[in-house]
Image (cartoon, grey):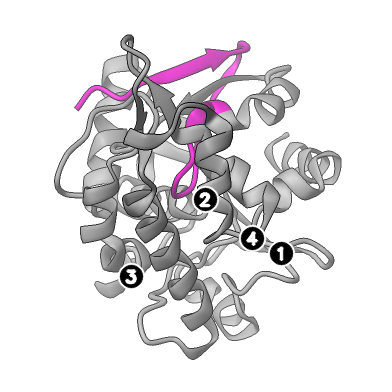
């Protein structure tokens, strides 16, 4: 699968992997700040952005897509930064291809499964609600983006989350609205997305230098999960943004850039 990507800067290759419902260009402002010393690649993962659609969406799939991308771009040593789903892709990749990854930055995701985790039940419900909203909004009736956002607002209360999700709304040449995401594939694979990185289930460990950044108000990395991460990544460091949530890089971009630069450089 040939993934769509954008690239800026020169230097050590740094690949950024977006989260669920996102796309590479969402990270452009962060990438610009990191491009002083890096060639920054912002990838659209499968079923997102301008990359191809496929019925399967597992972390093995996403890691396979990434190794194909590295081969096609001639990248033999990379640094990886991944948020949420993209973070678990990065975790899977680093565990499967340890010789390719020099440093790893994981943003608000753990390597472990969230299936049947009580502290994550509300977030699972949120994702199911988002996917059903994508499916049920009547794009055929909409004449403007505001029409779609108005209908979205009955299901998604947060303005910032709603507008983030609506970045996936596109028009055909004929003017008809459509979702750029492969909603059906994401819906069918949601359990895969919230499950553990596959190599973790096999007991795989990594010695790559890894930085885990979590939001203090986010449910994605609990204290118990953070304590267990060094069993997988033996050279892990941790930073908590106490007042931030899951999208901490958007909530506190200057702090985020400073922390990431210090780790990478």
Q: Which residue is mark 3?
A: 195
Q: Earlier in the sequence, mark 3 or mark 4?
A: 4
Locate the N terminus and report the quarter of the image it occupies.
top left
Residue at the spot 60% in from the left edge and 62% down from the top edge? 236
In this picture, residue 257 sits left or right of residue 81:
right
Q: What numbered label is drawn on residue 152?
A: 2
Residue at the spot 73% in from the left edge and 34% down from the top edge? 265
Q: Estimate how packed mark 1 is, as few (under 14), some (14 to 19) or many (20 or more) residues with alpha carbons within 10 Å.
A: many
Residue at the spot 50% in from the left edge and 30% down from the top edge? 24
> Would you identify the image quadrant in which residue 198 lies?
bottom left
Q: Are marks 3 and 2 in contact (CB under 8 Å)?
A: no
Q: Which residue is mark 1?
A: 215
Q: Position of residue 27 (x, y in %)?
A: 61, 31
Is label 2 or label 1 in front? 2
Q: Nearer the viewer, residue 140 or 25?
A: 140
Residue at the spot 43% in from the left edge and 59% down from the top edge? 206
- Residue 10, magenta (yes or no): yes
Is residue 163 at all visible to an observer of this figure? yes
Q: Which residues are magenta?
A: 1-25
Q: What numbered label is drawn on residue 157?
A: 4
Q: Earlier in the sequence, mark 2 or mark 4?
A: 2
Q: Earlier in the sequence, mark 1 or mark 4?
A: 4
Q: Earlier in the sequence, mark 3 or mark 1?
A: 3
How far is mark 3 from mark 1, CA to CA? Answer: 20 Å
Is label 3 or label 4 in front? 4
Q: Earlier in the sequence, mark 2 or mark 1?
A: 2
- Residue 193, magenta (yes or no): no
Q: Are marks 3 and 4 in contact (CB under 8 Å)?
A: no
How far is mark 3 from mark 2, CA to CA? Answer: 27 Å
In this picture, residue 77 sits left or right of residue 216:
left
Q: Estimate how packed mark 3 is, as few (under 14), some (14 to 19) or many (20 or more) residues with alpha carbons within 10 Å.
A: some
């Amino acid at each position: 699968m040939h993934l769509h990507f954008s690239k800026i800067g020169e230097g050590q290759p740094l690949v950024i992997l977006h989260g669920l419902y996102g796309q590479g260009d969402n990270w452009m402002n962060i990438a610009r700040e990191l491009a002083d010393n890096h060639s920054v690649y912002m990838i659209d993962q499968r079923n997102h952005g301008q990359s191809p659609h496929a019925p399967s969406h597992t972390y093995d799939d996403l890691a396979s897509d990434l190794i194909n991308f590295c081969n096609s771009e001639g990248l033999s040593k990379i640094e990886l930064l991944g948020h949420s789903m993209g973070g678990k892709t990065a975790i899977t990749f680093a565990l499967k291809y340890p010789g390719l990854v020099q440093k790893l930055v994981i943003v608000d995701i753990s390597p472990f499964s969230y299936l049947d985790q009580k502290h994550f039940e509300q977030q699972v419900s949120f994702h199911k609600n988002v996917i059903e909203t994508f499916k049920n909004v009547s794009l055929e009736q909409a004449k403007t983006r505001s029409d779609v956002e108005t209908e979205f607002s009955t299901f998604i209360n947060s303005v910032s989350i709603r507008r983030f999700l609506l970045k996936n709304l596109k028009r055909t040449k004929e003017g008809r609205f459509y979702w750029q995401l492969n909603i059906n594939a994401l819906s069918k694979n949601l359990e895969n997305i919230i499950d553990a990185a596959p190599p973790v289930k096999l007991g795989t460990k990594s010695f790559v230098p890894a930085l885990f950044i979590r939001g203090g108000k986010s449910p994605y990395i609990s204290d118990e999960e953070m304590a267990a991460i060094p069993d997988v990544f033996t050279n892990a460091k941790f930073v908590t943004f106490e007042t931030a949530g899951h999208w901490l890089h958007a909530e506190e971009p200057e702090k985020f850039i400073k922390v990431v630069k210090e780790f990478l450089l």
